Amino acid sequence: MHQGTGLQQRRAAQSARRRDLAGSSAGRERRAHRLYGAARSAYQRGRIRHRQCLHRRRPGHRGGDRGELTAASEPHAQIGARSRPYLLLLLSTLFLDLAANLPIGSLPLALTHDRAAPGAIALAMGGGLFASIFGSLPVGAIVDRVGRLATVRAAAVLCGVSMLGLTFAHGALGSGLLMAARGIALMAYMTAEFAYASDIVPRERIVSATSTLGMIGNLSFAIGPAAGVFLWQHGIGREQYAWGALSAALGLVVLFALPGGHDVHSTVRRRIFMRSAWLPAMGFLVGTTLQNGVNNALAVLTFHDRGVANGALIFSAMAFTTFVLRYPAGRLVDLRGPRFVAVPTAVVQALACLLAANAHGWVAVVVAGGLFGLAWAAVVPVGVGLFFERSTSRTRGAAMGAYNLAFSSGAAAGALVAAVAAQFGWGYTAAILVSGVAPLAALPFVLASPERRMRVSERRA
């Protein structure tokens, strides 16, 4: 009996172990199936997500919609996703700046034809600069609040309307008001444009890439004023501004193709309008842009009186030189910092002002313009670098508003200097020499400001 009972117990224990092993194997198999299914689902979701985002196929693949992604295709797709909106932004800037720069060369001639006083002409040409002084900081806050795309589109509309108005306006008052509207449009466009571009480009190239946008503006500045004078001399007067309105409309069409994924805006009211850390950069920009107001107001008429048929050549030489050197200057700021580049910039601009004050032939005018361009190629990267050091992505609109305030204030002060010099008979020579001293006076404040180079490429708020 005891032997039978022991045998039954051993058989029962063996059966129990077999059942346990069978259950354990089934559990492991079920767990393996679950893990395999989860991994397969994740793999499929990853393929679908990458295919939708990158739209890239394996090189040499010809099989309809069954293309597969490769590791090498992903960086190229990311570069393409960033470069497309950047190129669209460049194209829109070309159309808009070509429109806005026509009056720089021809409007002084038109107002002279209307028998406006020299001082009134200088104030009218500086109308946009004076308006930008009051609008720069609010527009910067608006860019952070409502977004970059809405601002650039509204700016393109305002630019086109102001150019169309110049077609019919006569006299310094009406032209000055329309130039004020044009100036606000350009200021708002630049503020939102730079802020939008700063979230597209790679962080290590943020200064050079954003400041390179100004290359298109320089190219337009090289063509626009001289083209305006050329058209005026060949019998095409104020109707040329209607062509400018059409160019602005084309720029607006391009802006609607920009993707909204890079548009950063805040859901709360922005309270940042100005920071004390931006003041040294603003002082340097005011000093370096003083010559813009003087040249815009008096250069064309002064060189015409000195026997130079097309005084707008100084703008063309400046713009073409800036166009060629802007990107190298931006990369130098990326690598060495804005303070390193600020010193030769101020010195070269002072030399340009000295040469322009004594230029009586077209060769001297072109050389002076080239020196202005050499300095101006670095002014924008230096300014952008100094402001980006002390701002983040969500405050970049406010920073660029302060940046544009400095530009507008400097150029408006230059227009005021030009108006005073014209009114008292001191002329272009005295005004442009004052402009040469200004950047040298502002330079010590930039060099004394604390350096925070890591903040240049910071992208988080």
Image (cartoon, rainbow, N blue to C red):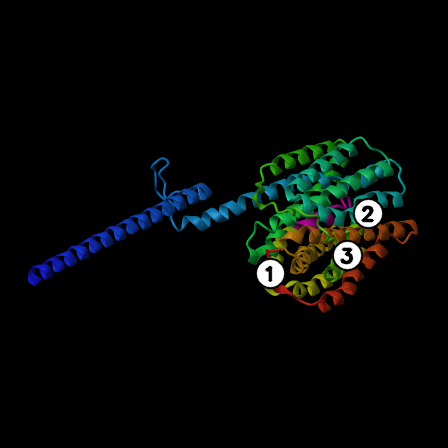
Do the numbered discs 1 and 3 sit on residues whose CB atoms are within 8 Å? no
Which residue is depicted at the point 18% across and 57% down?
17
The foreground one among 149 and 226 is: 149
* Residue 144 part of the magenta-drawn span: no
The magenta region covers: 298-321
Across and down, in percent, residue 126 comes to 81, 46
Across and down, in percent, residue 298 comes to 82, 48
Which residue is depicted at the point 41% across and 48% down?
73
Do the numbered discs 3 and 2 sit on residues whose CB atoms are within 8 Å? no
Which residue is depicted at the point 70% across and 61% down?
345
Mark 1 vs 3, N-terminal side: 3
Q: Which residue type does callout 3 highlight? A: Val
Mark 3 vs 2, N-terminal side: 2
Q: Which residue type does callout 1 highlight? A: Asp
Can you name the residue that lies furthest to the front here? 1
Q: CA distance from mark 2 to mark 1?
A: 32 Å
Residue at the spot of label 3: 286
Q: Would residue 336 appear left or right of 68 to someone viewing this image?
A: right
Do the numbered discs 2 and 1 sit on residues whose CB atoms are within 8 Å? no
Quarter holding the C terminus is bottom right
Q: Would residue 295 appear left or right of 90 to someone viewing this image?
A: right
Residue at the spot of label 1: 334
Question: Residue 403 sits in which quadrant?
Answer: bottom right
Residue at the spot of label 2: 130
Q: CA distance from mark 1 to mark 3?
A: 22 Å
* Residue 228 visible: yes
* Residue 359 visible: no
Q: Is label 2 in a helix, a strand or a loop?
A: helix
Across and down, in percent, residue 229 comes to 75, 39
Q: CA distance from mark 3 to mark 2?
A: 13 Å
Give the main secondary structure, helix, strand or loop, of the magenta stretch.
helix
The foreground one among 177 and 138 is: 138
